[in-house]
Amino acid sequence: MTDIATMKDFRTIYADTLIELAQEDSRVVVFEADLMSATGTKHFKELFPERSINCGVAEANMVGIASGLSSQGFIPFVNTFGCFATRRAYDQFFLSANYARQNVKLVGLDPGITAAFNGGTHMPFCDIALTRVIPDLVVVEPGDGWAVHHLTKAVYAHQGSVYVRLQRKGNPIFYDANQTFELGKGIIVRDGKDVTLVATGAVMLEQAILASQALEKENISAAVIDMHTIKPLDKELVLSYAKKTNAVVTCENAQMAGGLGSAVSEFLSEQYPTVVRRVGIQDLFGEVGTVEYLMKRFALTAGQIVQEAKDAIKRK
Amino acid sequence: MGRTMNNQELKQLQVIAKHIRRDTIEEIGNLGVGHIGGALSVVDILTLLYFRVMEHIDPKNPRNENRDKLVLSKGHAGPALYAVLAEKGFFPKEWLLTLNKGGTNLPSHCDMNRTPGIDFTTGSLGQGSSAAAGIALADKLKRIEAITYLIIGDGESQEGQIWEMAMFAAQYKLSNLIAFTDYNKLQIDGSTSDIIDLGDIELKWKGFGWFVQRVNGHDFEALEDAVLQAKAQGEKPSMIICDTIKAKGFSLAEGLASSHNMAYSKEVAKQAIEELMAEDGGKEK
Protein backbone atom coordinates (compact mmCIF):
# COMPACT_ATOMS: atom_id res chain seq x y z
CA MET A 1 0.00 0.00 0.00
CA THR A 2 1.32 3.42 -0.89
CA ASP A 3 1.55 6.15 1.70
CA ILE A 4 -2.04 7.11 2.43
CA ALA A 5 -1.06 10.71 3.14
CA THR A 6 0.16 11.18 -0.42
CA MET A 7 -3.00 9.91 -2.07
CA LYS A 8 -5.31 12.19 -3.97
CA ASP A 9 -8.65 11.67 -2.32
CA PHE A 10 -10.73 9.50 0.00
CA ARG A 11 -12.38 7.60 -2.82
CA THR A 12 -9.03 6.45 -4.20
CA ILE A 13 -8.00 5.27 -0.74
CA TYR A 14 -11.34 3.51 -0.32
CA ALA A 15 -11.23 1.87 -3.75
CA ASP A 16 -7.62 0.73 -3.27
CA THR A 17 -8.50 -0.70 0.13
CA LEU A 18 -11.35 -2.65 -1.46
CA ILE A 19 -8.87 -4.08 -3.98
CA GLU A 20 -6.55 -5.07 -1.14
CA LEU A 21 -9.43 -6.79 0.66
CA ALA A 22 -10.66 -8.50 -2.51
CA GLN A 23 -7.18 -9.85 -3.20
CA GLU A 24 -7.17 -11.49 0.21
CA ASP A 25 -10.78 -12.60 0.34
CA SER A 26 -12.87 -13.90 -2.56
CA ARG A 27 -16.05 -13.09 -0.63
CA VAL A 28 -15.62 -9.34 -1.16
CA VAL A 29 -17.98 -8.03 -3.86
CA VAL A 30 -18.52 -4.41 -4.90
CA PHE A 31 -21.94 -3.08 -5.91
CA GLU A 32 -22.54 0.09 -7.85
CA ALA A 33 -25.65 1.90 -9.09
CA ASP A 34 -24.22 3.63 -12.14
CA LEU A 35 -21.79 5.65 -10.03
CA MET A 36 -18.65 3.59 -10.56
CA SER A 37 -16.82 6.63 -11.88
CA ALA A 38 -17.82 8.66 -8.84
CA THR A 39 -16.84 5.93 -6.39
CA GLY A 40 -13.61 5.23 -8.19
CA THR A 41 -14.00 1.44 -8.43
CA LYS A 42 -13.23 1.11 -12.15
CA HIS A 43 -9.85 -0.42 -11.38
CA PHE A 44 -11.56 -2.87 -9.03
CA LYS A 45 -13.75 -3.93 -11.95
CA GLU A 46 -10.73 -4.45 -14.19
CA LEU A 47 -9.14 -6.70 -11.58
CA PHE A 48 -12.29 -8.50 -10.43
CA PRO A 49 -14.86 -8.26 -13.22
CA GLU A 50 -17.10 -10.96 -11.75
CA ARG A 51 -17.11 -9.36 -8.34
CA SER A 52 -18.02 -5.91 -9.60
CA ILE A 53 -21.79 -5.74 -9.92
CA ASN A 54 -23.33 -2.69 -11.53
CA CYS A 55 -27.06 -2.60 -10.82
CA GLY A 56 -27.80 0.46 -12.89
CA VAL A 57 -29.92 3.24 -11.50
CA ALA A 58 -31.88 1.03 -9.11
CA GLU A 59 -30.64 1.45 -5.56
CA ALA A 60 -33.45 -0.41 -3.79
CA ASN A 61 -32.85 -3.48 -5.93
CA MET A 62 -29.09 -3.12 -5.41
CA VAL A 63 -29.42 -3.31 -1.63
CA GLY A 64 -31.77 -6.27 -2.00
CA ILE A 65 -29.44 -8.15 -4.35
CA ALA A 66 -26.53 -7.47 -1.98
CA SER A 67 -28.57 -8.82 0.92
CA GLY A 68 -29.35 -12.04 -0.94
CA LEU A 69 -25.70 -12.38 -1.92
CA SER A 70 -24.67 -11.85 1.69
CA SER A 71 -26.96 -14.68 2.79
CA GLN A 72 -24.69 -17.01 0.82
CA GLY A 73 -21.56 -15.85 2.62
CA PHE A 74 -20.37 -12.96 0.45
CA ILE A 75 -19.37 -9.57 1.85
CA PRO A 76 -20.92 -6.88 -0.35
CA PHE A 77 -19.75 -3.26 -0.29
CA VAL A 78 -22.63 -1.28 -1.74
CA ASN A 79 -21.76 2.18 -3.01
CA THR A 80 -23.96 5.08 -3.99
CA PHE A 81 -24.59 8.67 -2.95
CA GLY A 82 -25.67 8.85 0.69
CA CYS A 83 -29.05 10.34 -0.20
CA PHE A 84 -29.94 7.28 -2.30
CA ALA A 85 -28.24 4.80 0.00
CA THR A 86 -30.45 5.83 2.88
CA ARG A 87 -33.56 7.59 1.62
CA ARG A 88 -34.11 5.62 -1.59
CA ALA A 89 -33.19 2.17 -0.31
CA TYR A 90 -34.14 2.57 3.33
CA ASP A 91 -36.72 -0.21 3.62
CA GLN A 92 -34.45 -2.61 1.75
CA PHE A 93 -31.51 -1.78 3.99
CA PHE A 94 -33.71 -1.92 7.08
CA LEU A 95 -35.37 -5.26 6.33
CA SER A 96 -33.41 -7.27 3.76
CA ALA A 97 -30.01 -6.26 5.17
CA ASN A 98 -30.54 -5.57 8.88
CA TYR A 99 -33.74 -7.24 10.06
CA ALA A 100 -32.62 -10.32 8.10
CA ARG A 101 -29.24 -10.06 9.90
CA GLN A 102 -27.13 -9.88 6.78
CA ASN A 103 -23.61 -8.55 6.34
CA VAL A 104 -24.11 -5.60 3.98
CA LYS A 105 -21.69 -2.69 3.99
CA LEU A 106 -23.62 0.29 2.68
CA VAL A 107 -21.42 3.22 1.75
CA GLY A 108 -23.12 6.60 1.37
CA LEU A 109 -20.93 8.96 -0.63
CA ASP A 110 -20.92 12.75 -0.43
CA PRO A 111 -22.28 13.12 3.09
CA GLY A 112 -23.91 16.40 4.08
CA ILE A 113 -22.67 19.51 2.30
CA THR A 114 -19.92 17.65 0.45
CA ALA A 115 -22.58 16.90 -2.20
CA ALA A 116 -21.83 20.56 -3.10
CA PHE A 117 -22.83 21.22 -6.74
CA ASN A 118 -25.28 18.34 -6.83
CA GLY A 119 -27.37 20.44 -4.47
CA GLY A 120 -30.31 19.92 -2.17
CA THR A 121 -31.72 16.84 -3.91
CA HIS A 122 -28.44 15.01 -3.40
CA MET A 123 -27.55 16.23 0.08
CA PRO A 124 -27.77 13.53 2.70
CA PHE A 125 -28.41 15.52 5.85
CA CYS A 126 -30.64 12.98 7.55
CA ASP A 127 -28.71 9.79 6.86
CA ILE A 128 -27.23 9.55 10.36
CA ALA A 129 -30.68 9.98 11.90
CA LEU A 130 -32.16 7.35 9.58
CA THR A 131 -29.48 4.74 10.12
CA ARG A 132 -28.87 5.31 13.82
CA VAL A 133 -32.32 3.95 14.67
CA ILE A 134 -31.69 0.60 12.98
CA PRO A 135 -30.98 -1.94 15.75
CA ASP A 136 -27.40 -3.24 15.94
CA LEU A 137 -26.29 -1.33 12.84
CA VAL A 138 -22.83 0.23 13.01
CA VAL A 139 -22.64 3.82 11.66
CA VAL A 140 -19.22 5.16 10.71
CA GLU A 141 -17.77 8.36 9.27
CA PRO A 142 -13.99 8.41 8.75
CA GLY A 143 -12.29 11.70 9.51
CA ASP A 144 -9.09 11.46 7.47
CA GLY A 145 -7.31 9.39 4.84
CA TRP A 146 -5.81 6.95 7.32
CA ALA A 147 -9.22 6.51 8.88
CA VAL A 148 -10.74 5.73 5.47
CA HIS A 149 -8.19 2.98 4.92
CA HIS A 150 -8.24 1.43 8.37
CA LEU A 151 -11.95 1.80 9.03
CA THR A 152 -12.79 0.23 5.64
CA LYS A 153 -10.81 -2.79 6.82
CA ALA A 154 -12.55 -2.71 10.21
CA VAL A 155 -15.94 -2.49 8.50
CA TYR A 156 -15.00 -5.51 6.38
CA ALA A 157 -13.95 -7.49 9.45
CA HIS A 158 -17.09 -6.63 11.41
CA GLN A 159 -19.72 -9.36 11.19
CA GLY A 160 -22.94 -7.46 10.48
CA SER A 161 -24.22 -4.59 8.42
CA VAL A 162 -22.60 -1.16 8.53
CA TYR A 163 -23.45 2.27 7.14
CA VAL A 164 -20.41 4.32 6.18
CA ARG A 165 -20.60 8.05 5.39
CA LEU A 166 -17.78 8.59 2.96
CA GLN A 167 -16.60 11.91 1.64
CA ARG A 168 -15.19 11.31 -1.84
CA LYS A 169 -13.00 14.28 -2.56
CA GLY A 170 -9.89 15.60 -0.88
CA ASN A 171 -7.58 13.84 1.51
CA PRO A 172 -7.21 15.82 4.73
CA ILE A 173 -4.72 14.11 7.03
CA PHE A 174 -4.87 14.51 10.81
CA TYR A 175 -3.20 11.27 11.89
CA ASP A 176 0.16 9.64 11.33
CA ALA A 177 0.81 6.22 9.89
CA ASN A 178 0.86 4.57 13.32
CA GLN A 179 -2.63 5.62 14.35
CA THR A 180 -4.93 2.70 15.10
CA PHE A 181 -8.68 2.71 14.56
CA GLU A 182 -11.24 0.51 16.22
CA LEU A 183 -14.98 0.54 15.53
CA GLY A 184 -16.82 1.99 18.50
CA LYS A 185 -13.76 3.65 19.99
CA GLY A 186 -13.41 7.40 19.61
CA ILE A 187 -9.98 8.95 19.31
CA ILE A 188 -8.66 11.75 21.52
CA VAL A 189 -7.12 13.99 18.89
CA ARG A 190 -6.24 16.66 21.41
CA ASP A 191 -6.60 16.74 25.16
CA GLY A 192 -8.20 19.64 27.03
CA LYS A 193 -9.85 20.55 30.29
CA ASP A 194 -12.41 23.33 29.73
CA VAL A 195 -14.64 21.95 26.98
CA THR A 196 -14.83 18.86 24.79
CA LEU A 197 -15.44 19.10 21.06
CA VAL A 198 -16.87 15.80 19.77
CA ALA A 199 -16.66 15.73 15.98
CA THR A 200 -17.42 13.23 13.25
CA GLY A 201 -16.29 13.23 9.63
CA ALA A 202 -13.50 15.07 7.85
CA VAL A 203 -15.24 18.43 7.43
CA MET A 204 -16.11 18.84 11.07
CA LEU A 205 -13.01 17.18 12.51
CA GLU A 206 -10.95 19.81 10.72
CA GLN A 207 -13.19 22.63 11.98
CA ALA A 208 -13.07 21.25 15.52
CA ILE A 209 -9.26 21.19 15.44
CA LEU A 210 -9.19 24.76 14.08
CA ALA A 211 -11.66 25.80 16.78
CA SER A 212 -9.51 24.23 19.51
CA GLN A 213 -6.53 26.23 18.22
CA ALA A 214 -8.55 29.45 18.21
CA LEU A 215 -9.83 28.75 21.71
CA GLU A 216 -6.30 28.11 22.90
CA LYS A 217 -5.40 31.68 21.91
CA GLU A 218 -8.11 32.80 24.32
CA ASN A 219 -6.73 30.51 27.04
CA ILE A 220 -9.55 28.04 26.69
CA SER A 221 -8.39 24.45 26.70
CA ALA A 222 -10.55 22.39 24.36
CA ALA A 223 -10.31 18.63 23.94
CA VAL A 224 -11.09 17.25 20.48
CA ILE A 225 -12.54 13.78 20.06
CA ASP A 226 -12.90 12.11 16.67
CA MET A 227 -16.10 10.12 17.03
CA HIS A 228 -15.65 8.18 13.80
CA THR A 229 -18.15 5.58 14.98
CA ILE A 230 -21.46 7.30 15.65
CA LYS A 231 -23.14 4.02 16.55
CA PRO A 232 -22.33 2.31 18.83
CA LEU A 233 -21.33 5.51 20.59
CA ASP A 234 -18.15 5.35 22.64
CA LYS A 235 -20.02 6.05 25.87
CA GLU A 236 -17.03 5.48 28.08
CA LEU A 237 -15.05 8.19 26.32
CA VAL A 238 -17.96 10.64 26.23
CA LEU A 239 -18.59 10.12 29.94
CA SER A 240 -14.97 10.51 30.95
CA TYR A 241 -14.66 13.80 29.02
CA ALA A 242 -18.04 15.06 30.24
CA LYS A 243 -16.76 14.53 33.78
CA LYS A 244 -13.42 16.08 32.95
CA THR A 245 -14.63 19.22 31.15
CA ASN A 246 -18.33 19.55 32.12
CA ALA A 247 -19.07 21.09 28.72
CA VAL A 248 -19.51 19.37 25.38
CA VAL A 249 -19.95 20.64 21.82
CA THR A 250 -20.89 18.13 19.13
CA CYS A 251 -19.89 18.86 15.53
CA GLU A 252 -21.43 17.09 12.54
CA ASN A 253 -21.96 17.66 8.85
CA ALA A 254 -25.53 16.37 9.15
CA GLN A 255 -28.96 17.17 10.51
CA MET A 256 -28.58 17.67 14.27
CA ALA A 257 -31.92 16.01 14.96
CA GLY A 258 -31.15 12.35 15.35
CA GLY A 259 -27.46 12.75 14.62
CA LEU A 260 -24.27 12.65 16.66
CA GLY A 261 -25.47 15.56 18.80
CA SER A 262 -28.62 13.64 19.61
CA ALA A 263 -26.68 10.50 20.43
CA VAL A 264 -24.36 12.35 22.83
CA SER A 265 -27.22 14.35 24.39
CA GLU A 266 -29.39 11.28 24.89
CA PHE A 267 -26.60 9.46 26.61
CA LEU A 268 -25.40 12.31 28.82
CA SER A 269 -28.86 13.50 29.84
CA GLU A 270 -29.50 10.08 31.29
CA GLN A 271 -26.08 9.25 32.68
CA TYR A 272 -24.38 12.52 33.59
CA PRO A 273 -26.34 15.66 32.73
CA THR A 274 -23.84 17.99 31.13
CA VAL A 275 -24.11 21.22 29.17
CA VAL A 276 -24.19 20.15 25.51
CA ARG A 277 -24.25 22.50 22.53
CA ARG A 278 -24.63 21.16 19.02
CA VAL A 279 -23.15 22.32 15.72
CA GLY A 280 -24.83 20.81 12.68
CA ILE A 281 -27.63 21.36 10.17
CA GLN A 282 -30.54 23.03 11.88
CA ASP A 283 -33.67 21.54 10.35
CA LEU A 284 -32.91 22.80 6.85
CA PHE A 285 -32.86 21.34 3.35
CA GLY A 286 -29.65 21.37 1.36
CA GLU A 287 -28.81 23.66 -1.54
CA VAL A 288 -26.09 24.11 -4.16
CA GLY A 289 -22.74 25.80 -3.70
CA THR A 290 -19.10 25.18 -2.97
CA VAL A 291 -18.28 23.33 0.23
CA GLU A 292 -16.82 26.59 1.58
CA TYR A 293 -20.01 28.50 0.80
CA LEU A 294 -22.19 25.77 2.29
CA MET A 295 -20.12 25.59 5.47
CA LYS A 296 -20.90 29.26 6.08
CA ARG A 297 -24.49 28.93 4.90
CA PHE A 298 -25.19 26.13 7.38
CA ALA A 299 -22.90 27.39 10.15
CA LEU A 300 -20.55 24.42 10.04
CA THR A 301 -17.44 26.46 10.81
CA ALA A 302 -14.71 26.68 13.40
CA GLY A 303 -16.13 30.10 14.29
CA GLN A 304 -19.49 28.56 15.11
CA ILE A 305 -17.82 25.87 17.21
CA VAL A 306 -15.84 28.52 19.12
CA GLN A 307 -19.05 30.44 19.83
CA GLU A 308 -20.88 27.32 21.03
CA ALA A 309 -17.90 26.25 23.12
CA LYS A 310 -17.80 29.59 24.92
CA ASP A 311 -21.55 29.46 25.41
CA ALA A 312 -21.31 25.96 26.85
CA ILE A 313 -18.56 27.00 29.24
CA LYS A 314 -20.67 29.96 30.41
CA ARG A 315 -23.58 27.64 31.18
CA LYS A 316 -21.60 25.17 33.26
CA MET B 1 -42.78 -32.47 -23.63
CA GLY B 2 -44.44 -35.79 -22.79
CA ARG B 3 -45.70 -36.81 -19.39
CA THR B 4 -43.01 -36.66 -16.75
CA MET B 5 -44.92 -38.22 -13.89
CA ASN B 6 -47.06 -41.33 -13.71
CA ASN B 7 -50.53 -41.51 -12.19
CA GLN B 8 -49.22 -42.83 -8.92
CA GLU B 9 -46.73 -39.98 -8.56
CA LEU B 10 -49.42 -37.48 -9.45
CA LYS B 11 -51.79 -38.98 -6.91
CA GLN B 12 -49.08 -38.86 -4.29
CA LEU B 13 -48.49 -35.13 -4.86
CA GLN B 14 -52.23 -34.49 -4.70
CA VAL B 15 -52.43 -36.28 -1.36
CA ILE B 16 -49.48 -34.32 0.02
CA ALA B 17 -50.99 -31.03 -1.19
CA LYS B 18 -54.24 -31.94 0.49
CA HIS B 19 -52.39 -32.54 3.75
CA ILE B 20 -50.55 -29.23 3.39
CA ARG B 21 -53.88 -27.46 2.84
CA ARG B 22 -55.35 -29.23 5.85
CA ASP B 23 -52.40 -28.21 8.04
CA THR B 24 -52.47 -24.63 6.75
CA ILE B 25 -56.19 -24.23 7.41
CA GLU B 26 -55.75 -25.70 10.88
CA GLU B 27 -52.63 -23.62 11.61
CA ILE B 28 -54.39 -20.32 10.86
CA GLY B 29 -57.73 -21.51 12.26
CA ASN B 30 -56.06 -22.31 15.55
CA LEU B 31 -55.01 -18.67 15.81
CA GLY B 32 -58.35 -17.46 14.43
CA VAL B 33 -57.09 -15.09 11.75
CA GLY B 34 -54.48 -15.01 9.02
CA HIS B 35 -53.51 -14.87 5.37
CA ILE B 36 -55.36 -18.01 4.34
CA GLY B 37 -56.21 -16.96 0.77
CA GLY B 38 -52.74 -16.34 -0.60
CA ALA B 39 -51.35 -19.25 1.43
CA LEU B 40 -53.70 -21.80 -0.12
CA SER B 41 -53.21 -20.51 -3.65
CA VAL B 42 -49.49 -21.41 -3.61
CA VAL B 43 -49.81 -24.84 -1.95
CA ASP B 44 -49.54 -26.79 -5.18
CA ILE B 45 -46.50 -24.83 -6.36
CA LEU B 46 -44.78 -25.39 -3.01
CA THR B 47 -45.76 -29.06 -2.95
CA LEU B 48 -44.33 -29.70 -6.39
CA LEU B 49 -41.11 -27.89 -5.53
CA TYR B 50 -40.42 -29.40 -2.12
CA PHE B 51 -41.69 -32.92 -2.78
CA ARG B 52 -40.50 -33.47 -6.33
CA VAL B 53 -38.29 -30.80 -7.82
CA MET B 54 -35.90 -29.20 -5.33
CA GLU B 55 -32.60 -30.95 -4.73
CA HIS B 56 -30.43 -31.37 -1.63
CA ILE B 57 -33.20 -30.26 0.71
CA ASP B 58 -32.07 -31.73 4.00
CA PRO B 59 -33.80 -30.88 7.29
CA LYS B 60 -30.63 -31.91 9.11
CA ASN B 61 -28.59 -29.45 7.10
CA PRO B 62 -30.92 -26.62 6.15
CA ARG B 63 -28.06 -24.36 5.05
CA ASN B 64 -26.39 -26.89 2.77
CA GLU B 65 -24.64 -24.70 0.23
CA ASN B 66 -25.51 -26.89 -2.74
CA ARG B 67 -29.23 -27.01 -2.11
CA ASP B 68 -31.85 -25.47 -4.33
CA LYS B 69 -33.22 -22.40 -2.55
CA LEU B 70 -36.64 -20.86 -2.33
CA VAL B 71 -37.66 -17.31 -1.52
CA LEU B 72 -41.33 -16.76 -0.79
CA SER B 73 -41.39 -13.08 -1.60
CA LYS B 74 -45.09 -12.91 -0.85
CA GLY B 75 -44.04 -13.54 2.73
CA HIS B 76 -47.58 -13.47 4.08
CA ALA B 77 -48.06 -16.94 2.57
CA GLY B 78 -45.56 -18.17 5.16
CA PRO B 79 -48.09 -20.44 6.92
CA ALA B 80 -48.32 -22.62 3.77
CA LEU B 81 -44.53 -22.88 3.59
CA TYR B 82 -44.40 -23.71 7.32
CA ALA B 83 -46.81 -26.58 6.73
CA VAL B 84 -44.54 -27.81 3.92
CA LEU B 85 -41.37 -27.50 6.01
CA ALA B 86 -43.03 -29.31 8.94
CA GLU B 87 -44.09 -32.10 6.57
CA LYS B 88 -40.49 -32.28 5.33
CA GLY B 89 -39.25 -32.61 8.91
CA PHE B 90 -37.53 -29.25 9.41
CA PHE B 91 -39.38 -28.85 12.71
CA PRO B 92 -42.14 -30.66 14.64
CA LYS B 93 -45.68 -30.26 13.34
CA GLU B 94 -46.75 -29.02 16.78
CA TRP B 95 -44.95 -25.79 15.95
CA LEU B 96 -47.72 -25.03 13.45
CA LEU B 97 -50.11 -24.40 16.33
CA THR B 98 -47.80 -21.66 17.64
CA LEU B 99 -48.24 -19.52 14.50
CA ASN B 100 -48.09 -15.81 15.36
CA LYS B 101 -48.17 -16.42 19.09
CA GLY B 102 -45.69 -14.45 21.21
CA GLY B 103 -42.23 -16.03 21.08
CA THR B 104 -43.10 -18.34 18.17
CA ASN B 105 -40.62 -19.52 15.56
CA LEU B 106 -43.36 -19.16 12.96
CA PRO B 107 -44.20 -15.47 12.47
CA SER B 108 -46.85 -14.28 10.02
CA HIS B 109 -44.15 -13.42 7.46
CA CYS B 110 -41.11 -15.59 6.67
CA ASP B 111 -38.06 -15.10 8.89
CA MET B 112 -34.83 -16.92 8.02
CA ASN B 113 -33.43 -16.34 11.50
CA ARG B 114 -36.36 -17.94 13.30
CA THR B 115 -37.59 -20.77 11.12
CA PRO B 116 -35.41 -23.68 9.98
CA GLY B 117 -35.67 -24.11 6.22
CA ILE B 118 -36.60 -20.51 5.39
CA ASP B 119 -34.01 -19.26 2.92
CA PHE B 120 -34.72 -15.54 3.17
CA THR B 121 -36.68 -13.12 5.32
CA THR B 122 -39.62 -11.56 3.49
CA GLY B 123 -42.70 -9.51 4.25
CA SER B 124 -42.22 -6.10 2.67
CA LEU B 125 -43.42 -6.92 -0.83
CA GLY B 126 -40.91 -6.83 -3.65
CA GLN B 127 -37.88 -7.31 -1.46
CA GLY B 128 -37.75 -11.10 -1.65
CA SER B 129 -37.39 -10.86 -5.42
CA SER B 130 -34.08 -9.00 -5.20
CA ALA B 131 -32.87 -11.29 -2.43
CA ALA B 132 -33.63 -14.31 -4.62
CA ALA B 133 -31.72 -12.77 -7.53
CA GLY B 134 -28.84 -12.10 -5.13
CA ILE B 135 -28.86 -15.73 -4.03
CA ALA B 136 -28.91 -16.91 -7.66
CA LEU B 137 -25.99 -14.57 -8.40
CA ALA B 138 -24.09 -15.94 -5.40
CA ASP B 139 -24.50 -19.50 -6.67
CA LYS B 140 -23.25 -18.43 -10.10
CA LEU B 141 -20.18 -16.77 -8.57
CA LYS B 142 -19.51 -19.91 -6.54
CA ARG B 143 -20.12 -22.17 -9.56
CA ILE B 144 -22.79 -24.00 -7.61
CA GLU B 145 -25.30 -25.64 -9.92
CA ALA B 146 -28.40 -25.00 -7.90
CA ILE B 147 -31.68 -23.32 -8.73
CA THR B 148 -33.20 -20.48 -6.76
CA TYR B 149 -36.99 -20.54 -6.85
CA LEU B 150 -38.93 -17.37 -6.25
CA ILE B 151 -42.64 -16.95 -5.64
CA ILE B 152 -44.17 -13.52 -6.02
CA GLY B 153 -47.76 -12.38 -5.76
CA ASP B 154 -49.82 -10.64 -8.39
CA GLY B 155 -50.55 -7.70 -6.10
CA GLU B 156 -46.86 -7.71 -5.25
CA SER B 157 -46.09 -7.23 -8.94
CA GLN B 158 -47.28 -3.64 -8.53
CA GLU B 159 -44.08 -2.96 -6.57
CA GLY B 160 -41.38 -1.23 -8.61
CA GLN B 161 -38.68 -3.35 -7.04
CA ILE B 162 -40.01 -6.41 -8.88
CA TRP B 163 -39.23 -4.73 -12.19
CA GLU B 164 -35.86 -3.42 -11.07
CA MET B 165 -35.01 -7.01 -10.20
CA ALA B 166 -36.45 -8.22 -13.52
CA MET B 167 -34.04 -6.02 -15.49
CA PHE B 168 -31.12 -7.01 -13.27
CA ALA B 169 -31.74 -10.76 -13.54
CA ALA B 170 -31.99 -10.53 -17.33
CA GLN B 171 -28.79 -8.46 -17.56
CA TYR B 172 -26.87 -10.96 -15.43
CA LYS B 173 -28.42 -13.93 -17.27
CA LEU B 174 -29.62 -15.58 -14.07
CA SER B 175 -30.87 -18.73 -15.75
CA ASN B 176 -30.67 -20.39 -12.34
CA LEU B 177 -33.53 -18.21 -11.14
CA ILE B 178 -36.99 -19.66 -11.70
CA ALA B 179 -39.85 -17.46 -10.55
CA PHE B 180 -43.57 -18.06 -10.20
CA THR B 181 -46.30 -15.44 -10.15
CA ASP B 182 -49.21 -16.57 -8.01
CA TYR B 183 -51.80 -15.02 -10.28
CA ASN B 184 -54.99 -15.43 -8.27
CA LYS B 185 -56.18 -12.04 -9.55
CA LEU B 186 -57.13 -10.76 -6.12
CA GLN B 187 -55.47 -8.42 -3.67
CA ILE B 188 -56.53 -6.94 -0.34
CA ASP B 189 -58.79 -4.23 -1.72
CA GLY B 190 -60.35 -6.23 -4.54
CA SER B 191 -59.46 -7.63 -7.92
CA THR B 192 -56.08 -6.68 -9.34
CA SER B 193 -57.79 -5.52 -12.53
CA ASP B 194 -59.83 -2.99 -10.52
CA ILE B 195 -56.93 -1.77 -8.37
CA ILE B 196 -53.87 -1.59 -10.65
CA ASP B 197 -54.25 -3.94 -13.57
CA LEU B 198 -51.24 -6.09 -14.40
CA GLY B 199 -52.25 -5.91 -18.06
CA ASP B 200 -50.49 -8.36 -20.32
CA ILE B 201 -48.34 -9.88 -17.64
CA GLU B 202 -46.75 -12.44 -19.95
CA LEU B 203 -45.75 -9.77 -22.43
CA LYS B 204 -44.35 -7.63 -19.63
CA TRP B 205 -41.99 -10.36 -18.40
CA LYS B 206 -41.03 -11.24 -21.98
CA GLY B 207 -40.28 -7.59 -22.58
CA PHE B 208 -38.00 -7.61 -19.57
CA GLY B 209 -36.01 -10.41 -21.16
CA TRP B 210 -37.32 -13.42 -19.27
CA PHE B 211 -38.27 -16.93 -20.45
CA VAL B 212 -42.01 -16.86 -19.83
CA GLN B 213 -44.56 -19.65 -19.53
CA ARG B 214 -48.15 -19.67 -18.32
CA VAL B 215 -49.78 -22.63 -16.61
CA ASN B 216 -52.61 -23.65 -14.32
CA GLY B 217 -50.96 -23.27 -10.92
CA HIS B 218 -52.92 -26.19 -9.51
CA ASP B 219 -51.89 -28.64 -12.23
CA PHE B 220 -48.82 -30.56 -11.08
CA GLU B 221 -47.99 -31.94 -14.50
CA ALA B 222 -48.18 -28.53 -16.15
CA LEU B 223 -46.12 -26.99 -13.35
CA GLU B 224 -43.45 -29.65 -13.57
CA ASP B 225 -43.30 -29.41 -17.31
CA ALA B 226 -42.80 -25.65 -17.01
CA VAL B 227 -40.00 -26.09 -14.47
CA LEU B 228 -38.25 -28.61 -16.73
CA GLN B 229 -38.51 -26.27 -19.69
CA ALA B 230 -37.25 -23.38 -17.60
CA LYS B 231 -34.21 -25.42 -16.58
CA ALA B 232 -33.63 -26.69 -20.11
CA GLN B 233 -33.51 -23.28 -21.81
CA GLY B 234 -30.50 -22.31 -19.70
CA GLU B 235 -30.10 -18.72 -20.92
CA LYS B 236 -32.57 -16.44 -19.22
CA PRO B 237 -34.25 -16.11 -15.86
CA SER B 238 -37.65 -17.81 -15.97
CA MET B 239 -41.09 -16.64 -15.05
CA ILE B 240 -43.91 -19.12 -14.77
CA ILE B 241 -47.21 -17.26 -14.55
CA CYS B 242 -49.51 -19.48 -12.54
CA ASP B 243 -53.25 -19.01 -12.83
CA THR B 244 -54.46 -19.86 -9.35
CA ILE B 245 -57.52 -19.65 -7.16
CA LYS B 246 -57.22 -17.66 -3.97
CA ALA B 247 -58.01 -19.80 -0.89
CA LYS B 248 -58.12 -22.90 -3.13
CA GLY B 249 -59.54 -25.86 -1.22
CA PHE B 250 -61.38 -23.84 1.46
CA SER B 251 -64.87 -23.61 -0.06
CA LEU B 252 -66.09 -20.85 2.23
CA ALA B 253 -63.28 -18.52 1.19
CA GLU B 254 -62.36 -19.69 -2.29
CA GLY B 255 -62.07 -16.90 -4.80
CA LEU B 256 -62.82 -14.12 -2.32
CA ALA B 257 -60.58 -11.07 -1.95
CA SER B 258 -61.62 -11.00 1.70
CA SER B 259 -59.74 -14.28 2.20
CA HIS B 260 -56.48 -12.32 2.02
CA ASN B 261 -56.43 -11.90 5.78
CA MET B 262 -59.50 -13.60 7.13
CA ALA B 263 -60.84 -14.44 10.56
CA TYR B 264 -62.39 -17.87 11.06
CA SER B 265 -63.01 -20.08 14.07
CA LYS B 266 -61.59 -23.47 14.92
CA GLU B 267 -65.04 -24.93 14.21
CA VAL B 268 -65.08 -23.43 10.73
CA ALA B 269 -61.56 -24.78 10.21
CA LYS B 270 -62.70 -28.23 11.29
CA GLN B 271 -65.63 -28.20 8.86
CA ALA B 272 -63.42 -26.93 6.05
CA ILE B 273 -60.90 -29.68 6.71
CA GLU B 274 -63.63 -32.36 6.79
CA GLU B 275 -64.94 -31.09 3.48
CA LEU B 276 -61.45 -30.97 1.99
CA MET B 277 -60.54 -34.46 3.11
CA ALA B 278 -63.84 -35.90 1.84
CA GLU B 279 -63.08 -34.78 -1.70
CA ASP B 280 -62.08 -37.36 -4.26
CA GLY B 281 -58.43 -38.07 -3.49
CA GLY B 282 -57.51 -38.50 -7.14
CA LYS B 283 -58.91 -35.25 -8.52
CA GLU B 284 -58.37 -31.69 -7.47
CA LYS B 285 -61.41 -29.48 -7.89
Image (cartoon, coloured by chain):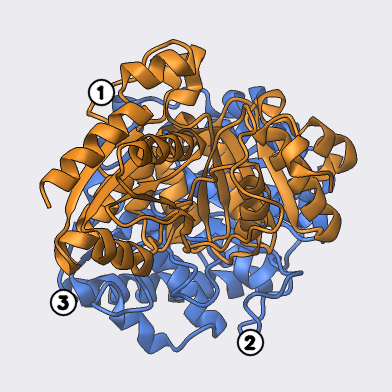
According to the picture, the residue beneath numbered tag 2 turns out to be: B60
| Comparing labels 3 and 2, the label whose residue is closer to the camera | 2
- The chain coloured orange is A
Q: Earlier in the sequence, mark 3 or mark 2?
A: 2
Q: Amino acid at mark 2?
A: Lys
Q: Looking at the picture, how far across and down is residue A96, in whole percent?
A: 48, 53
Q: Chain for mark 2?
A: B
- Where is residue A185 shown, x and y percent of the image? 48, 63
Q: Is residue A71 visible?
A: yes
Q: Amino acid at mark 1?
A: Leu
Mark in the foreground, 3 or 1: 1
Query: Disc 3 marks which amino acid?
Result: Glu
Rendered image: mark on residue B267: 3
Q: Where is residue B126? Give x, y as percent.
A: 46, 42
- Looking at the rendered structure, the secondary structure element under dot 3 is helix
Q: CA distance from mark 3 to mark 2?
A: 35 Å
- In the rendered picture, chain B carries what hue? blue
CA gap, disc 2 to disc 1?
Answer: 55 Å
Residue in the picture at 42% in, 66% down: B80
The answer, for residue B180, to whether it is visible in the render is: no
Residue lying at 61% horizontally and 42% vertically, measured from the top left = A78
For this rendering, which residue is in front, A223 or A72? A223
Image location (x, y in percent) of residue A2: 84, 44
Residue position for label 1: A284
> Do labels 2 and 1 touch, CB within 8 Å?
no
